[in-house]
Image (cartoon, helix red, strand yellow):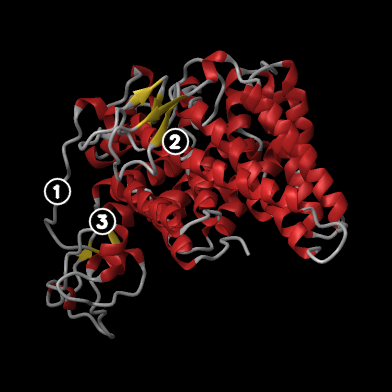
Amino acid sequence: MVRHGRLSRGCQVCRTRKIKCDRARPHCNQCLKSGWKCPQYGDTIERMFLHHNPENPDSDYVPNATIALPVICNTARVQNPALSTANILGGTIVQSTESRAIEFFMSAHTFHNTGLIRGHFEYLSTFNDDVMNEQRIVASLRAVALAAYATKFQHVALLKKARQYYVAALRHINAALLSCHEAAKNATIISILFLNTFEALTCESEDFPCQRETHLKGVASILDIRGVGLVQSRPGLQLFRQTLLCISVTCLMRSFRIPMGLVKLHRHTAAYMDTSDPAWKLSDIMIELSYFRAMVKDCTLCDPEKIIASAKEIDHNLCSLAGNMPEAWQFQVIELVTTSELVMGTQYHVYPDAWVAGVWNNIRTCRLLLHGEIKQQLESVLDTSLYDAVQYQHSVIIMQQVVSDICASVPQYCGYLPVKSGSVSYTQTVSNGIPAIAGIYLLFWPLLYAGQMASSEYQRDWVINRMRYIGETTGIQQAFVFEAILKRGVDPVQ
């Protein structure tokens, strides 16, 4: 059947991603920028005709079309037999494409359920089929898995399918939210967290933090309904820890208070957690920091002297935490004999695993925010008796050191330790139950602020290049958005 209406002349990738194609030759700049292989513009004649699917009259398809799929090596298969596709979907038979995508997501994008309670989907293997067979779980898992697979291996058709599952998942979640009983189920929380990760995998615009904020607000409301009953089991604690970390980072970025319901629930978890855990102690400080930043933003706290005093007090707590890290949480500083583009300067760090590195980097990012605020307040009283030149210089030095330390963690996150000319495949690198790609999610927030507060063009350009490398290697589109933010020198949440 002949197609009616104006036909877009953009490439297939840009049409599927629903962005404007500049139709550059031989490859469009949008594809080059985001690491996709541009299919160019040779399908115009085919697209003049519509092929209708008799089973779904509303869809268009090309008869007998096939999708070439990359072969995933055995190391990308699910490490835990309990995470097989059959168990996740309750034995439901799915297409090989979706099965392969789910296995890839479970093995590469989620923490394995070992040791510390850290969150980031490590609880998925513990829930029974009654939970994992819920429609909202199935649709959201397929959405995020296909998105992870499509962006990693550049399959634009799978990305379109992922977006269809995303819409279906939203429909199921919204239906569940009409009932307090259904809304409070673990399946609803997990589904929303899946969609939150979907946003990081597929985001195209710089306003994506606001888009993810909607999902996190929904989860926060559900956790408020669940109350202390949620955190009385290990899976519930894992769910809560993942949610609290995501919400804490969002609130710190946007200078919002962490919802009081979550703060109260966090206090209740002390009875079930190891409160000597550095990650636990840091979460307390991040809550305090979120309230400080919110009060400065809404002018509840507006006196420069009091702002500086409060910032220094919180920074003291962060320094105390960093100075009393357990032996198992210490890192090595490695000196390079010769310089390498993989390392900023001549030093890099080696941590026990990505989780430990993530906690260290979150401490550093919190200190960046505090000393950035101190520096700004001192600049506002430059010609008054409140100006403290020594404190100003101290804050500048702290910020430079913190940026360097964050950058020194990047080589480990990017999978090239020891530093060498080659690189290790992300799908093959697992440390303490954390696959390399899953660990990368812990790096985005610190690396963004390191780039924004870098003291030199060299540092900023290095961070920008690393963001691009991460996007090209993992397929997580959030890296390309952060790269664009750093190039433009804008604040993503203003």
Q: Is residue 443 left or right of residue 117?
A: left
Name the residue that disc number 2 marks: 409
The foreground one among 133 and 107 is 107
Furthest-front residue in this view: 390
Considering depth in this image, is 489 or 176 the residue closer to the camera?
489
Q: Is the Cβ of the residue at disc 1 closer than 8 Å to that at disc 2?
A: no
Residue at 56% across, 61% down: 492
Q: Position of residue 207 (x, y in %)?
A: 54, 63
Relative to 225, is 430 on the left or the right?
A: left
Q: How far apart, in angstroms, are the residues tagged by discs 1 and 2?
A: 36 Å
Circle 3: residue type = Ala
Determine the image quadrant of residue 366.
top right
- Residue at (32, 54) in percent of width and height: 159
Depth-wise, is mark 2 or mark 3 nearer the camera? 2
Say the numbered circle drawn on residue 68: 1
Q: Does residue 466 lie above or below 48 as drawn? A: above
Do the residues bearing badges 2 and 3 touch, measured as CB atoms within 8 Å?
A: no
SS class, disc 3: helix
Mark 2 is surrounded, within 10 Å at the Cα level, by few (under 14), some (14 to 19) or many (20 or more) other residues, namely many
Of labels 3 and 1, earlier in sequence is 1
Question: In terms of sequence position, does the residue under pointer 1 or pointer 2 come before the other?
Answer: 1
Q: Which residue is denoted by mark 3 in the rendering?
A: 157
Q: Nearer the viewer, residue 303 or 428?
A: 303
